[in-house]
Amino acid sequence: MSTTAVQGSDPSTVHRGAPAGEPLLAATDLVAGYVPGVNILNDCNLVVHPGELVGIIGPNGAGKSTLLKALFGLVTIRSGSVVLKGEEITNHRADSLVRRGVGFVPQTNNVFPSLSIQENLEMGLFQAPKRFNERFDFIVDLFPVLGERRKQRAGSLSGGERQMVAMARALMMDPSVLLLDEPSAGLSPVRQDETFLRTRKINKAGVSIVIVEQNARRCLQICDRAYVLDQGSNAYSGPGRELMNDPKVIELYLGTLATDVEAAAAADRPAPAGPAAGGPAAGGPAAAGGPAAGGPAAPPAPPAAG
Ligand SMILES: Nc1ncnc2c1ncn2[C@@H]1O[C@H](COP(=O)(O)OP(=O)(O)OP(=O)(O)O)[C@@H](O)[C@H]1O
């Protein structure tokens, strides 16, 4: 089945493949931006149903990170609405969103390097410290290594391990939906794989997830549904594996099929032209927003990921 290009904001095309029933999170016709008069999101739509893992992919500068930040109150929404569990949360402050069940993991500066793993997790629960033992048990069930190494300084961890701590910190408040901003960025391929598996594991534990990713193929492999954003609007949407095999999405956003490259290599001829596989080149503007808002002050930048 080929994927439907999104036309206007007809929910049946904008949210193709979405389960029936009341969504957990629904963003409708969002217009948002940083500079007065310049909109980065243009009538952007997204729904997340309970238990879903939803991906957001698209070229550099498409507005993927901006969409997450708008959902989390870090970028002002100029028009449109965000509804969580039937309740309007448009432009609510991040700390209030955290209390209501929205977790956010920024792309960078997302751990306190001078604090231990346990202290980082305590920071994630500063609005409800009495729940520490219960939530810590949940985290250690998911990621046993965090229990074994709870006294280790976060700054001494590898990039992939720091991402794990950042996700765990956001999970401490028991969110119903977790927003992940490019968790694989800057990691080696092996660490990226681990990060995608961890994301899936968190989702299987019952947490709905919205994940923004540069690594479009891996993202489509793990997510239930995905949205392709282009210039701040929905371009395509559908089940992850359908999008991955849709010729238009491949041509515009995913690049040459790996199988084409393999076949070309075997035949010792150039692969078909197209953008680099794995999505457009990284190196877009640095994401604004800093550490998970709704939490304590910004931790200093962690050492380079590895
Ligand atoms: N803090 C900011 N102030 C002004 N403009 C910004 C800010 N952050 C991002 N932008 C602009 O918003 C647009 C969308 O950026 P955004 O980071 O949301 O895109 P993206 O799809 O996540 O891209 P990438 O994959 O490169 O991270 C870009 O044109 C960018 O320059």
Image: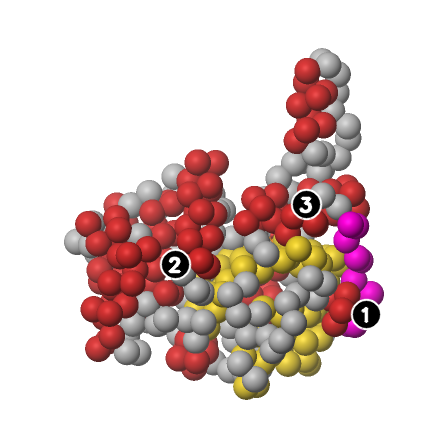
Q: Determine which of the numbered discs, if any, sits on residue 244 in the image.
A: 3
Residue farthest to the front? 20
Q: Residue 89, how many percent across, how many down?
A: 54, 83
- The residue range painted magenta reads 1-10
Residue on which the image places disc 1: 8
Where on the image, by quarter, is ligand 1? bottom right
Gap in Å between the C-alphas at discs 1 and 2?
34 Å
The answer for how far apart the CA atoms under marks 3 and 2 are is 26 Å
Circle 3 or circle 2, nearest the eye: 3
Residue depicted at 62% across the width and 76% down the height = 21
> Relative to 215, is 53 above or below?
below
Asked whether the viewer can see residue 60, the reply is no
Marks 3 and 1 sit apart, C-alpha to C-alpha, by 22 Å
Side of 183 where 302 appears, left or right:
left
Number of marks drawn: 3
Q: Quadrant of the C terminus?
A: top left
Earlier along the polypeptide chain: callout 3 or callout 1? Answer: 1
Task: Tell me which amino acid carries mark 2.
Answer: Met
Q: Is mark 2 within 8 Å of ligand 1?
A: no
* Magenta-span inclusion, residue 5: yes
**3 and 1 marks in contact (CB < 8 Å):** no
